[in-house]
Amino acid sequence: MRPYLFRLPEWLPGVFSGRPIFSYGVMLGLSFIFGWYLTSYFATKEGFDSKVTGNTLFLAIVGALFGARLLFFVSNPSLPFSLKSFFSYQDGGLVAYGGYLGGIFFSYAYLRWKKNNFFAFADQATPQLALGLGFTRVGCFMYGCDYGRPTDSFLGISFPRWGFDSALSQYGLHKGSAAFNHHVNKCVQLLNDVGKLGEINYNPGNMTTTMVEQCKAFGAKIHGTKSFEALAQVMTQSFPVHPTQLYASLAGFAIFAFLLWARKHRRFDGQVFLLFLLTYGIFRFLIEFVRDDLQRGNVGVLSTSQFISLLLVGAAGIGWWLLPRQLNRLTLEPAPAKTGGGKKRKH
């Protein structure tokens, strides 16, 4: 786990001097690069105009960044909001579903304006959404966000107590990985509830038996107040948790491969798009049961992402019934002679 890969040289001018290159940002950038190239390639083969494709992808990226940040604040209304904090992407806080929905909305609006077939284009772009999931979740793992619930199984991975010098704090780097800080706070809660600590079944925050026993052992090493600062000095890493980031990354690459296959065998425009909504919606609904990171939001008994998953899976089912009845299967016409031949989508 490494939140940033390296720092830029100190001799660079202005804001570039000593700036860390975030692991998540690198993986997000790779997802944009691969997504742009592959979508352009597929869309061109399908007959879409290269300028329309480029503009659509640019707007999709803008929409994705905007939507991912917007859903983060909607899911966490208690967080202070300002335009400055909204555009502080170095502080994290990007929700995948918000990115998908924002990118889809922006691209849909543009393609409708240009009188292009959105669902035909979406079939060329959708596999790359899953590929982006595969890349960005590796970045999440390296940064330590989006971690899972504690587990005593062999799958458990601990996140370290890393520290950063004061010069790096201005770029959004904080002491302690998210899982580490979360677990220290859980131990502090456990140790400071003195009246309940002796109860056999006392277990705040759904801690595993191992966590409870280790918290008590760490607390025994501290003389005086069991504060966060004191406990953080005796703990070196978080308790083992499900590496949900890696689960999601593997799922992303698997869905990408499946959608590439489906793209070649689709029977109607929008089929690949609907398959993504269905497969990712089901996966995201299930993975939320083992997620434990904070600031995810809730809608009743469901997490925000589980609620959205149900809506998208339902939309996929409705779309699967409607689209074959409303859209014709890939009608082509010859392109103008000046383009050098080939085929062009008829809208």
Image: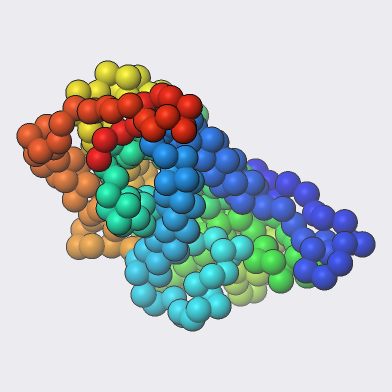
Q: Judge by depth and name the residue closer to the eye, 170 or 53.
A: 53
Question: Is 158 positioned to the left or the right of 104 in the image?
Answer: right
The quadrant the C terminus occupies is top left
Question: Is 53 positioned to the left or the right of 170 in the image?
Answer: left
Quadrant of the image occupied by residue 77: bottom left
Residue shown at 67% from the left, 63% from the top: 173
Residue shown at 57% from the left, 40% from the top: 33
Q: Is residue 196 visible?
A: no
Relative height, residue 163 to residue 271 (above, below): below
Residue shown at 64% from the left, 59% from the top: 176
Q: Judge by depth and name the residue closer to the eye, 35 or 300.
A: 35
Q: Residue 302 at x, y = what percent?
A: 23, 55
Q: Judge by depth and name the residue closer to the eye, 16 or 21.
A: 16
Relative height, residue 119 to residue 250 (above, below): below
Residue shown at 33% from the left, 26% from the top: 334
The quadrant the N terminus occupies is top right
Visual colour scheme: rainbow
Question: Is 119 positioned to the left or the right of 45 in the image?
Answer: left
The single residue placed furthest to the right in the displayed view is 11
Q: Residue 340 at x, y = what percent?
A: 48, 27
Q: How many marks?
A: 0
Q: Residue 172 at x, y = what percent?
A: 65, 66
Question: Is 290 positioned to the left or the right of 131 in the image?
Answer: left
Q: Residue 74 at x, y = what percent?
A: 35, 69
Q: Is residue 50 visible?
A: yes
Q: Judge by depth and name the residue closer to the eye, 121 or 127.
A: 121
